[in-house]
Image: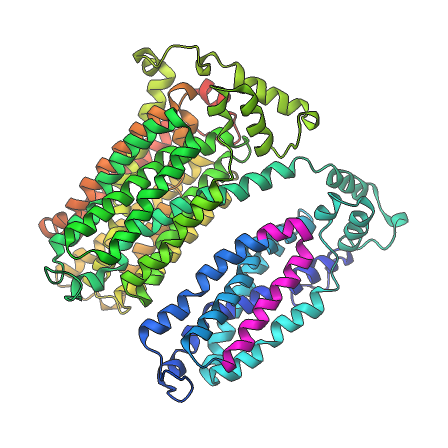
Amino acid sequence: MVFINVGLSKCYWNQYFAAISVNLLSLSYGGVILWTSASYIYLKKDSNRFETGVLTKEQLGLITAALSPGTLVGALFFGWLADKIGRKRCLLLAALPMLAHWIIIPFARNPLQLAVARFLGGTAGGSCFTVIPIYITELAQDNLRSTLGMLLSLALSTGVLLINTLGYFLHYITVAWIMTIIPLAFLVLFAFNPESPQYLAQRNREKAERSLRYYRGISSSGDANEEFQQELSRLCKSEDEKPEKLQLCWHDFINLLSLSYGCVYSWTSASYVYLLEDSRQFETGVLTKEQLGWVTAAAFPGSFVGALFFGWLADKIGRKRCLLLAALPMLTHWLIIPFARNPFQLAVARFFAGTAGGCCFTVIPVYITELAQDRLRSTLGMIFALNLGAGILLINILGYFMHYITVAWILIVIPLAFLVCFSFNPESPQYLAQHNKEKAERSLRYYRGISSSGDANEEFQQELSRLCKSEEEKPGKPQLCWHDFTTRKARKAYLIGLGLVLANQFNGSLAMQNYMTFIFAEAGSNLPPMLSAIIVSAIQLTGTCSSTHFVERAGRKTLLLISISGIFLGESAMASYYFLTSKGYDTSMFNWLPIASFSLIQFSANSGILSVIFPVIAELTPPKIRSTVVRVQMITMFLLASVITKIFPYLTVTLGMPGTLFICAGFSFAFIVFIAIFVPETKGKTIEAIQDSL
């Protein structure tokens, strides 16, 4: 209870106790995450422990990677279960696979048994990331919510430190027995906490009141003050929370496709070592850097074609069916890779994946904009970028431990899961409003968490009325004409969007992502290039997470300015380092600077300019031409990405790394000025208000 100081009011005690006790599960999962790293020496050298002898690097990679699919399964299963049986019982159940993980390890006699243990530990970890934040949010007072929410990250970090410390001094079997204490302590201590008040408010007001009294330190109803009564009253009419939960849940499923494309995006970087050194895989021998450049760039013409085709198709057959079709070329990509015997076949696979990526960038932002409530629109839109970042991190971690063919077989699971999960989603209400008002109403009710027409409130009826009365969207209206694109609002929205697309590409951060391992190898960093790439990928994901958190607080424009400014500083520092090194100055004291600067560039890019522009472009564009304009903007982006990715290595040869980076920094500075002057703030505004401001 180190977080409770002497001056802490009694009304906070139970909230702290609940938050600390529930995060014992997170503490244990922190140990699970880095268990293979902490046990590496024993696993590689202890030949008497396993029937198969010491573990190979491939086997160790499979054991390490088994955690990720377990986490995915756990997030899906426990996230669903939490709404069925409650947060408390769900978390108590999640402790069982965590216990099983630590108990299996001492008895494991082959790599498969260790992988099963890791998978089970991952399922418990999935509950940590999905259920614990909900539980904390629902029980905490406003002034404590952020503090209690941070305990999850603190517990994970403590678990990582603990497993590394124990692993340094003790054999991994001894460590496993010690670590079983944590989930056991969780089961004992957390059992004393009641269910969250918000979950109970949906079922039993009396139990909800008792739970809320417990967490507010009020012993009886007679001691309850007016503030408590107001909070209880707000809690028990919780219709507003239902649609938000539904939207977030189904949004995770749609973005499985963008998660897969994130893996595609950084695949060549993650497979760099095998592609340039494994002469047995290809008829032509190892790939040259020229061939690797063509394989890398092949995804972008595919994205161009995909943006054109799927953007057109989305208006013909609907957003949902279009996205389901896009999963097929993504599946094809992962299936071709294990059988590819020459660079051309790899390039074809990348082209197919690019077509699916084109769909992600053109159709998903439109789909989300059309189904989301105003207060959730940007947050939901940011999860698209979050999944891209998660995909980049995932492919770099898997690529570090496993051969790229094994990785391809593992990643087939993601588009398959997308096909299964997303098929349960209805079409977007705005698309249906153009064809069938009854279906549009059913879809809108689904996304607003309203079970029947009789439960619809006035706010819902007004939203439905706005959706269906727009003359521009009625099927009887003429097709798009040139005049629709030449109105003042349309021109301004298009030009601002084009400026953001140019900023997205010409700052250079995306091109650098594709050549991460090459850049780190050139820099002479003390860390292995692949490990440096994993670190930067994790930092990228952190940047995207931060933008998801702050997009509705700081605003889109503020995030974009901070983002592009960070890129400018990082590129300037990195360019200066390379310049001084090339001139013969002793820069050995600053060997850390390339990875630090690169990390700043990627964190800044992912916290704004690479993630925020997609919802902003969709918000700025008038509804009638939104699909077409977003499609054109994304096509422009993919064309630029294809060219810039291809010429980046040639620029480094012609101008040197410092010259290339100074040019990128110059562009970044120009875009700071552009965003400050021309990009409007859209935070918290309705689509209509945004259009009126143009």
Q: Residue at x 31, y 57 (%)?
A: 408
Q: Residue furthest right?
A: 222
The image quadrant where one finds the C terminus is: top left
Let me know if residue 598 appears in the view: yes
Of residue 230 and residue 302, the one placed in the foreground of this image is 302
Residue 66 position, x and y percent, is 43, 65
Q: Is residue 353 above or below residue 101?
A: above
**Which residues lie in the magenta part?**
79-107
Q: Is residue 283 left or right of residue 406?
A: left
Of residue 654 and residue 617, the one placed in the foreground of this image is 617
Magenta region, main secondary structure: helix
Residue 86 position, x and y percent, is 68, 53
Residue 438 position, x and y percent, is 57, 21
The image quadrant where one finds the N terminus is: bottom right
User: Residue 629 appears in which quarter of the rendering?
Assistant: top left
Q: Is residue 637 above or below residue 116?
A: above
Q: Residue furthest bottom?
A: 48
**Magenta-colored stretch includes residue 80:** yes
Let me know if residue 592 appears in the view: no
Q: Residue at x 53, y 52 (%)?
A: 76
Q: Is residue 493 above or below residue 267?
A: above
Q: Residue at x 50, y 83 (%)?
A: 173
User: Residue 597 appears in which quarter of the rendering?
Assistant: bottom left
Of residue 439 and residue 169, the one placed in the foreground of this image is 439
